[in-house]
Image (cartoon, grey):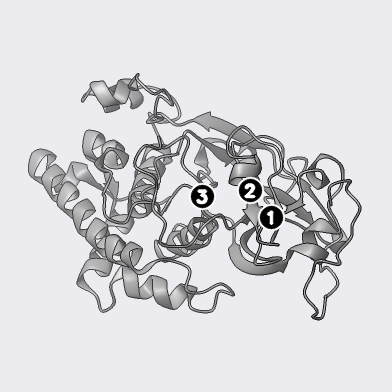
Amino acid sequence: LGNNTRDCSYVPHRLIRPPFFLSLGQKDGGTQIKLVIDYPHGAQALFKPMRFPRDQQTLPNHFYFTDFERHTAEIAAFHLDRLLGFRRAMPVTGRTLNMTTELYQLADGELLKTFFVSPSSNLCFHGKCSYYCDTAHAICGSPDTLEGSFAAFLPPKEMATRKVWRHPWRRSYHKRKKAQWEMDQDYCSLVKDIPPYDSGRRLLDLMDMAVFDFLMGNMDRHHYETFRLFGNETFPVHLDHGRGFGQPFHDEMSILAPIIQCCMIRHETLSTLIRFHNGPKPLSELMRESMAKDPVTPVLWEPHHVALDRRVKIILESVRDCVSKTGAQEAVVHDDFS
């Protein structure tokens, strides 16, 4: 492996299956390793590998922008998005790979150079990226079996062009500075005067996104994409949730800033949250049922399920405070776009 020859003699004596896909390569950009998997007939998937066990939480000294990504968060986010009725996230499934035949044998170029065998005789690689792409933070199999998430790709931009928007409640991504919305409680009034948030569905869609992100504890929402074809009457695509589901015992209230500052939520979204709270089944149970057939189930550590139900209650309490402040007619918005 040291001279990039594909010698698989280290693999235990067992049946080695052929790969299901044609080729793979590292995805450009991003802070952590992700692979683009190419299937026959032009299909592609985005692969995020497993880094650590499900019960490992976000490290206490890690900022949100240096947190590890979790493949299970991508899987769970897809199911959560569907249960909320948004259906704005790309389909994601878990899968267990044979690293030898499905990664190492197909890797080429710079990615191939990063494969090695660890002192425990496990096959590892680290790729190249701006965070955690080194030997000390390598992705390792057991000995060459590896879990990961496979996300479907959006249509090519030639077919469905997209526009990237800076999220108005984007964090500063700085170790010491705060964003404007963190210091100005009237910030929402500024946002409401700026297109496309001054009319149409977009501001309500950001309220939905705040609900979605708060439930999974995702602080890493800096930009979002929409389809150009539909102008400002389209929905934001929910992408990149690898930093969610990292802190089951902490509820990050700042994620709810759009709802708290604007005192606004879509009626249909509120009705869904009330149903999760009142039953017949809580969100945690619905998530377990939804993810039960995923190939890498159980997807989430049990405390994350407990956190989902607790956070549903917190959102409802925040909406109740808004209704007390502004009245139900202003706080709960009926629209035709959900």
SS for callout 1: loop
- Helix, strand or loop at label 2? It is loop
Give the side of residue 126 with respect to residue 84, left or right: right
Q: Residue at x 48, y 56 (%)?
A: 73
**In the image, residue 138 lies at what x, y percent?**
63, 48
User: Which residue occupies 39% across, 53% down?
Assistant: 57
Pointer 1 with pointer 2, Cβ within 8 A: yes
Of 62 and 236, the residue lying toward us = 62
The residue singled out by tag 3 in the image is 242
Farthest residue toward the front?
119
CA gap between label 1 and label 2 equals: 10 Å
Marks 1 and 2, the one that precedes in the sequence: 1
Q: Secondary structure at mark 3?
A: loop
Categorize mark 1 by other alpha carbons within 10 Å: few (<14), some (14-19), many (20+): some
Q: Is residue 261 left or right of residue 123?
A: left
Q: Which residue is mark 1?
A: 118
Frontmost of labels 3 and 1 is: 1
Residue 296 sits in quarter: bottom right
User: Real-space Cα distance between discs 3 and 2?
Assistant: 17 Å
Disc 1 marks a residue whose amino acid type is: Ser
Give the percent coordinates (x, y) of residue 287. Answer: 40, 70
Q: Nearer the viewer, mark 3 or mark 2?
A: 2
Q: Residue at x 24, y 21 (%)?
A: 183
